[in-house]
Amino acid sequence: MFDRGTYTEINISNYLYNIDLIEKKAGTKAIPVLKANAYGHGAIPLAKALVKRGVDMIAVAFLGEGIEIRKSGVNIPTLVFNYVKPEYIKENMENFIYTLGSIEQLNGLIEYFGSDIKKIDFHININTGMNRMGFKREEIDFLIKQIKKYDLNIKGIYSHFATADALDEFVKEQYYNFISAVDYIEDNGIELPIKHICNSAAALFFPEFAHDYVRPGIATYGLQPSDIEKEEGLKPVLSWKSVVAKRGVLKAGESVSYGRTYFAKQDIPIATIPVGYADGYFRQLSNKGYVLIHGKKCNIIGRVCMDQFVVETTKVENVNLGDEVILIGEQNGNRITAEELGTLAETINYDITSKITWRVPRVYID
Ligand SMILES: *Cc1c(COP(=O)(O)O)cnc(C)c1O
């Protein structure tokens, strides 16, 4: 695994520090979101750290992610955001909380479970404007009717913002839709013990909407949830490191890598970095991305291949085989962030870290 000299380093103390910071800013407790292998950071070690710290609940996108965490010995209440087939719910009732997100899903569950449906713990998802999951306002009467008829075990209610990162008026509109749905359901005699709506951006920038819990993902990893407003207090969690695998000179007129997309105008010193798109280093960073060697910026020249890419090292003196290369993180006071790589690859920080593949070992430090 470590033979290649490429790995990510995950700082668990910084992860826990960020959760404390978010809870302080929001004024309420967090349900840390560990979906997509904790946005590439590795869900199991972080879940174990959360158990030690103490959290009431974690959240994942899919049941399979929750089962994997459970198998590692972590047994805390786990909220599953997405649709799960009834037969899989049946085998995983203990300490899993399922999202009730549509009438069709509810009807299917009633058909499959009959009166046993009351054994399932649910959080209701209200569609307040995201329009991907959840009950619309006009569906709530039917929902209420079925909750009463089947004595459903409703443990909580939530919704999700579409534009919390943009800090716009739609956030408020969604919030009022949420509150009005919550009030309506409660006025009909249904108890909703837990209410939550805030993702990272909302937890940090709209703490007045926090309610009982916030559901931060991206900010717990020290990554910025918005490109409009920064939370400077967050500490970076992930660094991605490699080594110089070869050094050389690209002579004037020569090209480098597949497709010959870069030609040297004069002789330039170059280095080969043993990382490629099969590691999750975006191919879109061809001729755009950069790395740090000895703290100096070295631009990618030519295309990113499956396992390697080439950088120019004009600013660096004495490059040696095995020298540390920073893909994300800090070196000699300079830093490359996932946000920066996201911008260069025309995507977002979430996409950059969550795509770092299985081929890159994760090392955990405290
Ligand atoms: C992914 C997700 C979150 C976390 O969002 P961040 O922007 O990463 O904080 C919260 N709630 C739901 C429903 C999600 O799908």
Image: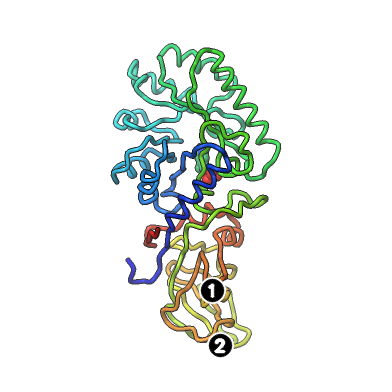
Quarter of the picture containing the N terminus is: bottom left
- Identify the residue at the far right of this view: 169
In the rendered image, residue 233, in percent from the top left (x then y), is placed at 58, 53
Q: Is residue 293 above or below residue 82?
A: below
- Secondary element under disc 1, as helix, strand or loop, is loop
Label 2 residue SS: loop
Amino acid type, residue under disc 1 in the picture: Asn
Locate residue 161, reporting x and y percent: 59, 37
Name the disc covering residue 332, or none: 1
Spatial CA distance of label 1 from label 2 is 30 Å
Q: Closer to the N terminus: mark 1 or mark 2?
A: 2
Q: Is residue 139 above or below residue 312?
A: above
**Quadrant in the rendering for residue 364:** bottom left
Q: What residue would you read off at disc 2?
A: 251
How is colour applied across the structure in the image?
A: rainbow
Give the image location of residue 196, x and y in percent: 53, 32
Q: Is mark 2 within 8 Å of ligand 1?
A: no
